[in-house]
Amino acid sequence: MSLSIIKTVSVCKSVSSNEAQLSILNDISFEIFARERVAIIGTSGAGKSTLMGLLAGLDSPSSGEIELLGQPLSQLDDEQRAKIRSESIGFVFQNFLLIPSLTALENVTLPAILRGEGEDIVKAQQLLHSVGLSGRETHLPAQLSGGEQQRVALARAFMTQPKILFADEPTGNLDEKTAQNIIELLFEMNREYGTTLVLITHDSNLAERCDRILTIHAGELQEL
Amino acid sequence: MQTSNVSSGNKMLLRWSLREIWQGQLWPVMAALTLIVACVVALSALAIRVDAVLTSQGRAMIAADLVFNSATATPSLLSDAQNLGLTSSSQTRFQTMAFSDNNMQLVTVKSVESSYPLRGELILMGETEKVSHSVQASELWIDEQLLSLLAVNIGDKLAIGDAELTISGKIIAQPEVTFNPFRTMPSVLIHESDLPKTGAIQVGSRVQYRTFFKGEKSALTQLQQNYQLQASQRWISEDNNGRSADLISKSKQYLSLTIVMVILMASVTLILTCQHYARSRIDTVAMLKSMGASKGWLRRWLLVQVGLMFTAGLLLGSLVGILLELLLRLPLQHILPEQLPGYGYLPFVFATLVALLIGLPALGIPLIRLLDTSAIVVLQAQQPTPSKKGWWLNILPIAAFIFFYGNNSLVWMVLSGLIVLFFVLANSSYALLFLLSRYKWGAAMSLALSRIKRSQKITIMQLAALSGSLLLVTLIWLLRSDLLGDWQQTLPAETANVFALNIAPAQQQAYLQELDKNNITRSPAYAIIRGRLTAINGGKIKDTVAPEKQDINVLHREINFTWAKQLPDYNEVLEGAWTDKGGVSVEQSVAKDLQIGIGDSLDFTVNNQTVVATVNSIRAVNWQSMKPNFYFIFTPDVIAQLPATWLVSFRIDDSQTPLLNELGRNYPTVSLLDFRIIGEKIQQLLAQVVWSLSVLAGLGVVSGILLIFTLLRLSLTQRQREITLYRTLGASRRRISQTLWCEYGVMAVVAGFVAAIGAESIEFSLMKWGLKLTPSVHIEMWFIVPLLALLLVFASLMSAIKQLLQPLQ
Ligand SMILES: Nc1ncnc2c1ncn2[C@@H]1O[C@H](COP(=O)(O)OP(=O)(O)O)[C@@H](O)[C@H]1O
Ligand SMILES: [Mg+2]
């Protein structure tokens, strides 16, 4: 039996908008184990991002319990959850979310700085090299193409050797060919670092490449 | 190892923050901050200098920093002054007859020490045109007019009371001038050591003792505090001494008002730029939080940025402020004294304080709320949740404001007016917009109006900020114009500067003809009949009026009466109306002191005859106006038949001096009171004040305009995303700029109009209740201000449109 990395028990999420209660996720229970690659698929607006936000401790469920790396999130405060994220979690976002005023290299070192580790320039350079961006260290995000920005984001995500990588539609803003490259790189690095991967996508081909596929539909989760 | 890691992290933070400032994310905030600092530095530096110049002018007029005026000698004050390290000088002043071999004349004798005057200029010219600046023992200096009045020459002997002194020369200029021709008698200066010889100081004689002080402000204040004032004693300082004091105190009030208004405007801009900055940081903060940044780390991250920005803003602002002050001073150069009083470090301390006090809540509150940004924003845009966090930071500037301006009623008037107007105006301008949107307009206009309507809260905020700033700019300007207008009205350049008294009835026609022949502007001739008020409604003054009330000028000596068919048009009738027969018009202060009302019957003694008249009106008289003025003016039937001499005032230019001398020779019995030097002094002071105020107002307006410009630019950049989208969707450049034009144009016109109304009403109350001047309406502003707003919109649109129209990459 391998180690449980994420475990949800009867998680519900509803938001109130205009006085009405809107239920987004309903009674969701599942478990993800170490080194698994899990795809979450569903149509736009199905609640994928909402679920990922809950799993990563960015938001709290309306009811139910989530355990992240063996720790029940409901018993942690914001700061403690932030600490878990800085130590064990990496993100890749649909819109890259690089800091526009930092160079590629500085963007990559950022997670280490957040952990109070100082700038590990050598490691950041290695990572940039492994995503194929040697020589672009001093470029600002505005000087990079979308695909190149996502590569920087990948390098940044692996900077702290996270236990879990959350990727929310990492190729949603990229053309097909670039998207393919990014996905290859993502799986390759994931393999190399032995990271647990939670990949959100609406592309079923991409989902096929993962070990498990979870689908969200009408707030309910199903495993295919 | 650990420390080097942290320091390398800190270094990166520093680099990052610098780059943020450099790349422009913090640019608007920094611009607003720099502007605040620059304005406060420049304005307060200039204010300190103008203040010093005005104060020294005022002090030159009273011959000291502080004067003590008393009916009795007060030696105790002198020793106290000495202990406090103050320089002092005494003067004894009384009226007496001066006798020459040929003539006699009532004169004011000022017996002074050699140290007189402590401030201002005394110019004495003796035989052989030798000039000196102080009075020495056994000297006697006399007003020039006395030479002819007494028919004497320099070197002749003159009897002042019991003393016989030789005339040392004439007084060319002296401080302590008054502008009321009837209260001015020709004066003579003698030395304090000769005072006993005159025998003027006796029990019961009316003597004024003046003590002049010079020294540190704190010591002067201490001196005043230590001494308990008794009846018939008072302190005279540069800001309670007549006309010039009024000029100076009003100018000082204007200075502080202008500074407050500029600070207010700048704060509005700073608040808006800070909110914009905080909003633009939400994504970054959320992203950092998702990567596990702790609140402590984020706080440090923001503090470094803000700290750097503050330091840079302070340095840059101070520099710009120094340059600005220099620039502002250029036009003032020829009227400011050569040796400028320095402004020291105060403007910088003040600017730093202001920047901190405003910056703390303006930046602090949105940043505190920014720290609460939820990390989930990285995945889903969130509705901003309203927060009250950090509101207490507002207490700081409010407390400081109350501390600094707590007892400045003018500032409070402006402020409360602003607060009321802020709400009323922002909402009414919104209502106006709403009304506009109900009519049919072109496509661009409709789009613009609907947009304005849709983003209600933002629109109201923007309108409030825009109309508020415009209002302040307008107010600064209106206040300047009205103040100057008032001064120029009471002290017009063509005021009479010579008074001819004592014209015999037989000479009167010829004298007036002589003036008219030479095209000299003159007043009508007034009959002068000297007399006393003796009874009110049959009750003798001696018996009915309380003793302390009897101690006013009007009662303790003979005063000048006149008669006229009509009241002079420069006297405002406050109560009652002029009649044809049996009437007298009374000056308001006398009426108030003696509780005289319309319909009262007054008895006067003139030449041992009693005349009776009924009060028909109460008049306001401006004694500083250099026009013939009287406490009592009778209808002709009451006193016209009594023997009188005549008075006329006229204006002499420098080129006409020979004519004046000729008049003096041809009519030796007519006394000429020459006010040219005094008039010039006052005009000079006025010119200085006018310049200083105009420059300050100009700076206020310019900085206000700059701030409004910043505000508009900011609002436009906030539209970047939306406009880029339109552009990407293929909207033509014309369509976009037309819509923007309509939207901002409408907003500018509405805000401008509302600002004009607001400024007008605040100005009205300030003039009427604050400065106690006559308010007026400025219709032209109702057009100029909206036009100015439109121009600003045009400028900001032009400067931003290129960037706004860039399509999405
Ligand atoms: N804070 C919120 N308030 C209101 N509705 C929300 C909120 N967060 C998410 N939603 C709604 O929940 C649904 C799921 O959103 P999301 O998880 O982002 O979908 P997706 O599967 O496309 O990532 C959407 O319909 C969205 O509008
Ligand atoms: Mg999503």
Image (spheres, coloured by chain):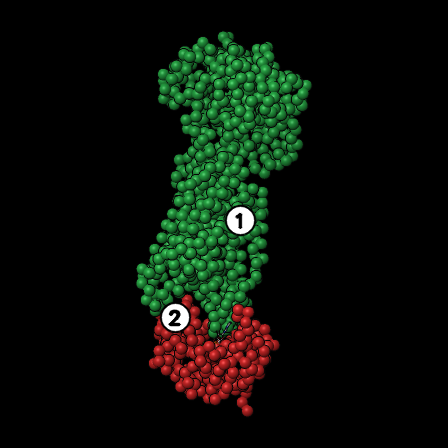
- Between marks 1 and 2 in the image, the one whose residue lies nearer the viewer: 1
Quick one: which chain is red?
Answer: A
Is residue B304 shown above or below A183?
Answer: above
Q: Secondary structure at mark 1?
A: helix
Instruction: Report x, y in % for residue A38.
Output: 47, 85
Q: What crowding class fits label 2: few (fewer than 14 Cα within 10 Å), some (14-19), or many (20 or more)? A: many
Q: Residues within 10 Å of mark 1 (few under 14, many from 20)?
A: few
Residue in the picture at 41% in, 85% down: A204
**Residue B757 appears at what percent x and percent y?**
46, 45
Residue that badge 1 annotates: B420
> What residue is at 53 percent from the left and 79 percent from the top?
A25
Q: Which chain is green?
A: B
Q: Residue B196: x percent and y percent?
A: 60, 17
Find numbered disc 2 in the image and state the secondary structure of the residue it sits on: helix
Label 2 belongs to which residue?
A141
Residue B600, picture quadrant: top right
Q: Amino acid at mark 1?
A: Val
Three-letter code for the amino acid on which mark 2 is drawn: Pro
In this view of the protein, which residue sits in the foreground, B305 or B6? B305
